[in-house]
Amino acid sequence: MGVAMGAMGSDIAVDAADVALMDDNTSKLPYLKWLSNTTIKTIKTAITLSMCINFVAVTLSVLGILNPTTGALVHNAGSCFVVLLAALLYDRKYEYS
């Protein structure tokens, strides 16, 4: 993984890097690692939740409990849960170790 310093790095280095820091402060790298791990965990949780909701909805549709309209509403509710999980990333606090 490449990290470029945005303030003093050349344009080529910033374009080629995976991560570009806007200043020359490398003390933010642990926060960046924590944020990326938290984001990946949130993505995996959201995908799992969405797949579980869809699996339950398909099962209920096969059993005749859900009609197409309620199935569409359940699917949209699953999408809303995914968006809400992503929004929770803004509220997480970084704990210094």
Image (spheres, rainbow, N blue to C red):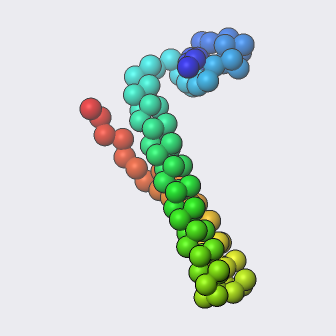
Residue 21 position by quadrant? top right
Q: Nearer the viewer, residue 70 or 36?
A: 70
Residue 33 at x, y percent in the picture: 44, 31
Residue 25 at x, y percent in the picture: 46, 20
For residue 36, above or below residue 90: above
Q: Nearer the viewer, residue 89 or 48?
A: 48
On-image quarter of the C terminus: top left
Residue lying farthest left? 97
In the image, what residue occupies the spot 50% across and 42% down? 40
The answer to whether 25 appears left or right of 55 in the picture is left
Residue lying farthest front? 63
Badge count = 0
Residue 6 at x, y percent in the picture: 60, 20
The answer to whether 68 appears left or right of 4 in the picture is right
In the image, what residue occupies the spot 63% across and 19% down? 17
Residue 67 position by quadrant? bottom right
On-image quarter of the N terminus: top right
In the image, what residue occupies the spot 52% across and 57% down? 48
